[in-house]
């Protein structure tokens, strides 16, 4: 007997897109406040990025005690993390636990993609269409689609002829992959490629890592948490929560106060030696305050990591390729690893510089480089990242006031006041959208702040009977301009990266994140609200009638 599907309303207060960290919390929060919702996710279950990214070695780079929700003391006390950086299955279990605990799943429609959204200026509502052919009318459209959710891969000539297996780290088969006895190439050396390299190497007959850009990877130094550690974490929760809230990157780290240039070379080495042993993001972000703004300090990090790679990788030819840096440290999202560089000491692992000798195309049995070098392969793994930040939002085909599409509006780069509200697209909210601090911070913290702020807007509108909430063009322009000016004070614009929206050809090159950190952003959002939502126009139904 098939279970009948619940009848869902076609008119709701809010459509929420996504059932990862953002969508789950948005659903919980709005439902608790009595708003009606429809929640959609293309996946068949909750988890967002942690649903899709099941490649071997997928693990969080943020530490478990803050890479989680903070809104519920009950959840915090009931859930037990096994280690410093939980692996993908554990984070997925956590999100399943939260969904069950809060009874969220019943209100989520899985396996359903939003195909378009059109703002109706007459009724001040969004008409949202799904790939199931349904149209839902909602006052508010809230996206929780993540910044790394539309996988991207190269279109090599002849790839369709390749007879071996093709994988992308973000679309990993749920049943796993066995690389035993296979010749594998892995393309891409960002966080995903660096995490899966050691595990694929353990299985494959031979693994060839195709590197376009050398990464500055830092040891994660994962460890199991003991009961004693967990007890202490709970006991000291208030103290480290204070650190999290004061941290620009939303992590429980002390904020560094001095430049590397204030220390002698010996002092710098002592600081970095200690942080290298501690591992994780603390290495880049707790030693000195100017790694991203001062080329001299940055160079201290570059030289330090170069020396570490050369010390670790025994074959000087491999070490040379792994150290062919073309950008300052931390200007691309810094990866963390477990035995990445050590893996190149294996006889069955090689590294090829495809910046100097790019892939020319694929054949039935492998990949050929521009030089003519040919690699016979049984499997190709693309760890080539995503159409980041804007990709998934644009795929939803949103049309705002006056028939303007989001693609048109963002043709020179994404624009949204506070990173949440694109002008011309009233009642649309983009959780951790371009212009929030999201991509530079611990995501769950930014998500909670964004959702709480959005929920307050909805409550205010309900109280006052308002039906339309729209950023002004002036407020949005200043927000975007301030972000560009802040980025220009840093080393970020010196390299193409997904932070710069320039990791794929054809995307407008513009910095996409609020740079002044989470505490500053939170304060600005609170001020805007306290000031009667300064920078926004709030309209009432009478105006809708007049349209
Ligand atoms: P990524 O950081 O964008 O890295 C993609 C890699 O593929 C880069 O080395 C890139 O080289 C290379 N690449 C892209 N297109 C290529 C092409 N056509 N030919 C050759 N090489 C190409 O993607 P990712 O590693 O999947 O990570 C994306 C983001 O997801 C991370 O920055 C992080 O924020 C998040 N993430 C987090 C975790 C975690 O917390 N543990 C794990 C994985 C991912 P170029 O640099 O030259 O473009």
Image (cartoon, rainbow, N blue to C red):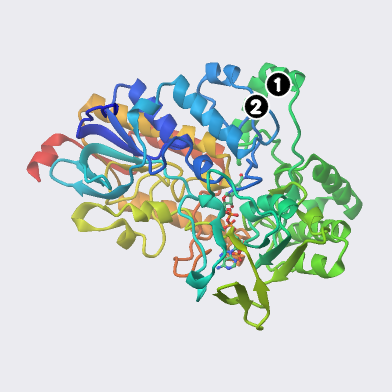
Q: Position of residue 441 (x, y in %)?
A: 57, 42
Horizontal arrangement in the rendering, residue 201 relative to residue 528 (left or right): right
Circle number at residue 501: none
Q: Position of residue 180 (x, y in %)?
A: 69, 54
Q: Is residue 293 visible?
A: yes
Quarter of the rendering occupied by the N terminus? top left
Q: Measure the alpha-carbon separation of dots 1 and 2.
A: 8 Å
**Of helix, strand and loop, which one carries label 1?**
helix
- Given residues 150 and 172, the one toward you in this image is 172
- Given residues 533 and 148, the one toward you in this image is 148
Q: Position of residue 186 (x, y in %)?
A: 64, 61
Count the numbered circles shown. 2
Nearer the observer: mark 1 or 2; the answer is: 2
In which quadrant of this rendering is ligand 1 seen? Answer: bottom right
In this view, the residue farthest toward the right is 266
Q: Which residue is mark 1?
A: 230
């Amino acid at each position: 007997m098939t279970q009948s599907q619940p009848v869902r309303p076609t008119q709701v207060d809010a459509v929420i897109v996504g059932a990862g960290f953002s969508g789950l919390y948005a659903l919980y929060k709005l439902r608790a406040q009595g708003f009606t919702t429809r929640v959609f996710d293309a996946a068949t279950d909750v988890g967002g990025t942690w649903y899709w990214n099941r490649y071997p070695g997928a693990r969080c780079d943020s530490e478990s005690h803050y890479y989680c929700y903070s809104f519920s003391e009950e959840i915090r006390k009931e859930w037990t993390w096994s280690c410093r950086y939980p692996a993908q299955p554990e984070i997925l279990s956590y999100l399943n636990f939260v969904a069950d605990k809060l009874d969220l799943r019943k209100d989520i429609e899985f396996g359903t993609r939003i195909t378009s959204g059109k703002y109706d200026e007459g009724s001040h509502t969004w008409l949202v269409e799904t790939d199931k052919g349904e149209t839902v009318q909602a006052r508010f459209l809230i996206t929780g689609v993540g910044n790394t959710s539309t996988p991207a891969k190269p279109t090599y000539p002849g790839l369709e002829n390749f007879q071996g297996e093709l994988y992308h780290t973000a679309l990993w088969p749920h049943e796993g992959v066995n690389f035993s006895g296979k010749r594998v190439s892995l393309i891409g050396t960002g966080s995903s490629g660096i995490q899966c390299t050691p595990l694929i190497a353990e299985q494959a007959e031979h693994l060839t890592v195709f590197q376009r850009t050398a990464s500055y990877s830092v040891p994660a130094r994962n460890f199991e948490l003991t009961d004693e550690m967990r007890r202490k974490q709970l006991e000291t929760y208030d103290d480290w929560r204070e650190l999290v809230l004061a941290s620009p990157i939303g992590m429980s780290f002390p904020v560094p106060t001095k430049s590397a240039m204030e220390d002698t070379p010996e002092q710098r080495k002592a600081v970095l030696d200690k942080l290298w042993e501690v591992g994780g993001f603390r290495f880049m972000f707790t030693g000195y305050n100017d790694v991203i703004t001062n080329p001299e300090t940055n160079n201290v990090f570059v030289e330090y990591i170069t020396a570490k790679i050369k010390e670790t990788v025994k074959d000087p030819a491999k070490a040379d390729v792994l150290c062919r840096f073309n950008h300052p440290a931390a200007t691309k999202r810094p990866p963390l690893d477990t035995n990445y560089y050590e893996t190149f000491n294996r006889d069955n692992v090689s590294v090829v510089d495809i910046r100097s000798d790019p892939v020319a195309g694929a054949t039935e049995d492998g990949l050929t480089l521009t030089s003519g070098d040919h690699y016979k392969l049984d499997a190709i793994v693309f760890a080539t990242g995503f159409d980041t930040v804007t990709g998934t939002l644009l795929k939803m085909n949103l049309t705002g006031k006056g028939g303007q599409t989001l693609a048109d509006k963002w043709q020179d780069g994404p624009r949204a006041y506070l990173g949440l509200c694109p002008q011309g697209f009233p009642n649309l909210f983009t959780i951790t959208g371009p212009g929030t601090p999201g991509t530079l911070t611990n995501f769950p913290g930014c998500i909670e702040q964004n959702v709480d702020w959005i929920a307050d807007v909805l409550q205010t509108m309900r109280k006052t009977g308002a039906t339309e909430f729209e950023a002004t063009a002036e407020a949005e322009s200043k927000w975007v301009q301030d972000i560009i000016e802040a980025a220009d004070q840093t080393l970020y614009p010196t390299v193409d990266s997904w932070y710069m929206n320039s990791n794929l050809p054809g995307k407008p090159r513009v910095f996409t994140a609020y740079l002044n950190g989470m505490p500053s952003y939170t304060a600005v959002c609170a001020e805007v609200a306290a000031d009667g939502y300064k920078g926004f126009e709030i309209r009432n139904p009478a105006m809708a009638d007049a349209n």
